[in-house]
Amino acid sequence: MDASHKRATVYFDPELHRALRLKAAETERSVSDLVNEAVRLSLAEDATDLLAIEERRAEPEMDFESFVKALRQRGRL
């Protein structure tokens, strides 16, 4: 591990920890690699969600009741 990596203590549910260790052994990867990948994927999903929110920010807001009424008026329900 080089100086660009940071150390953290993470507490896992015992069954998740066992599954993680088994997956690491099965895939010949380290637990750290698997955890880093999972966190990276989670953050990428968050970034995608935030981008979608930003892109839709200009859309007019409509509450659920009004939306359902509009669907009914257009014959969609």
Image (spheres, rainbow, N blue to C red):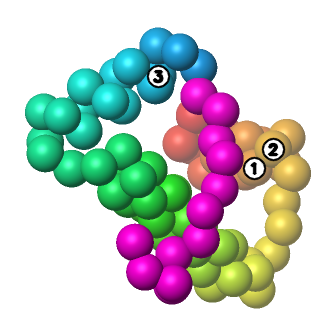
Where is residue 56? Give x, y as percent. Answer: 67, 78
Above or below, 72 against 20 in this view is below
Above or below, 56 against 49 in this view is below
Residue to which mark 2 is pinned:
64
Q: Nearer the viewer, residue 16 or 52?
A: 16
Mark 1: secondary structure: helix
C-alpha span from label 1 to label 3: 42 Å
Crowding at dot 2, Cα within 10 Å, few <14 / some 14-19 / many 20+, comes out as few
Q: In the drawing, what numbered circle is on residue 42?
A: none
Where is residue 54? Give x, y as percent. Answer: 69, 82
Above or below, 66 against 65 in this view is below
Left or right, 55 with respect to 63, comes to left
Where is residue 75? Give x, y as percent. Answer: 56, 43
Q: In the drawing, what numbered circle is on residue 67?
A: 1
Residue 10 shown in magenta: yes
Provide the residue span drawn in magenta: 1-12
Q: Nearer the viewer, mark 1 or mark 3?
A: 3
| Residue at x-position 13% and y-position 45% | 28
